[in-house]
Amino acid sequence: MGASLETTGTSPGTPAGAGVETTGTSGGRRVEMVMGTAVGIDVRTPLPPRLLDRLLDDAFGWLRWVDDTFSTYKPGSPISRLARAEPTGLLPEAHEIPEIREVLDRCAELREATAGYFDAYASGRLDPSGYVKGWAAERVSRALAAAGAADHCVNAGGDVRVRGWAGPDRAWRIGIRHPHRDVVCKVLAARDLAVATSGSYARGPHIIDPHRARPVTEPGSVTVAGPDLAVADAYATALYAMGSTRARSFALPEPYDFLIITDDGRGLSTPGFARHVITPSVTPARPATQPDVRRAEGQASGCRDRYST
């Protein structure tokens, strides 16, 4: 959580999530509550309305399947059954679901790559939530691109994946929220980028340092940018779990970069991250000119993001 998409061209007074805005052959956007958060998909590629509706239906259908499969809040989900069965060694058939094997294998690789600071067992039992939301959103983005929707943004509770153009010769603009003030402190411009933020300012201390088995309370936030949202999400979680002193000296693999905002408000970033920044100016996090975006955020505020990092 923590990144938000800056959009233009929305109709004042039209709540986001009310449906796909289409006129003839055009793009459109949709916001739905899924995985415990507001997920928005904004397609700017001109497409026939029927095709666009089908693509968005498929995307949100996939996200609902992911929630039904990976939610640790649902006792009957395959991942919950697997978590209960692991201590007994009697693994249910859920272990054979290809997507579960893929996620668990990737979590194991990322645990090794982060010296154990990203760990699907950090809470003491299996919980790959810190990887799943970014993984699901990345899969949606790839499917949209493959289907011809080359210009789009997927915003999963503040973890953002953009591709293509936001408008004619105009890159997407992604705002990074200040962890202690209701302002956007950095704005990134990108045409092909994943941006994930971890912090405790929205949900309180919930990210656990696996080596000390206790929640982390600093730095203010960590944002990671790179080519894959699932990986960026996992690295953001790991860097936050390290604490600011260890995180700032951790070498992310290229081409991933990070921004650390410390508790005293200082921003520390890698040179690669700084290259994405187009303005360091502080602006309101919820611009008054975007009532539809503001209303969607209000709808989401009462629902805890089960997959946030």
Image (spheres, helix red, strand yellow):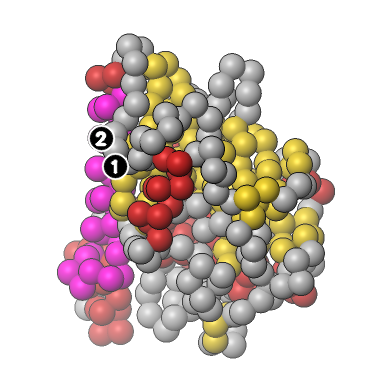
Q: Is residue 144 above or below residue 35?
A: above
Helix, strand, or loop for circle 2? helix
Query: Dot 1 surroundings within 10 Å: few (below 14), some, or many (20 or more)?
Result: many
Name the image quarter holding residue 179: bottom right
Please report the residue visible at 44 percent of the width from the left and 81 percent of the height from the top. Answer: 123
Name the image quarter holding residue 260: bottom right
Picture coordinates of residue 85, whole percent (x, y)? 24, 78
> Is 91 in the magenta?
no
Please report the residue visible at 59 percent of the width from the left and 51 percent of the height from the top. Answer: 285
Please report the residue visible at 76 percent of the width from the left and 47 percent of the height from the top. Answer: 281
User: How many labels sit on residues?
Assistant: 2
Q: Are marks 2 and 1 in contact (CB under 8 Å)?
A: yes
The amino acid on which the numbered mark 2 sits, given as a three-letter code, is Asp
268 sits to left or right of 103: right
> Is 54 in the magenta?
yes
Q: CA distance from mark 2 to mark 1?
A: 5 Å
Please report the residue visible at 75 percent of the width from the left and 38 percent of the height from the top. Answer: 278
The amino acid on which the numbered mark 1 sits, given as a three-letter code, is Phe
Q: Nearer the viewer, residue 247 or 254?
A: 247
Helix, strand, or loop for circle 1? helix
Q: Of the numbered discs in the image, which one, if any, rests on residue 280?
A: none
Q: Is residue 288 above or below residue 107?
A: above
Picture coordinates of residue 78, whole percent (x, y)? 23, 65
257 sits to left or right of 182: right
Picture coordinates of residue 275, whole percent (x, y)? 78, 41
Picture coordinates of residue 263, whole percent (x, y)? 72, 73
Q: Is residue 100 visible?
A: no
Q: Of the numbered discs in the image, which one, if any, rests on residue 57?
A: 2
Q: Is residue 269 visible?
A: yes
Magenta residues (range):
52-78
Q: Of the numbered discs in the image, which one, if any, rests on residue 60?
A: 1
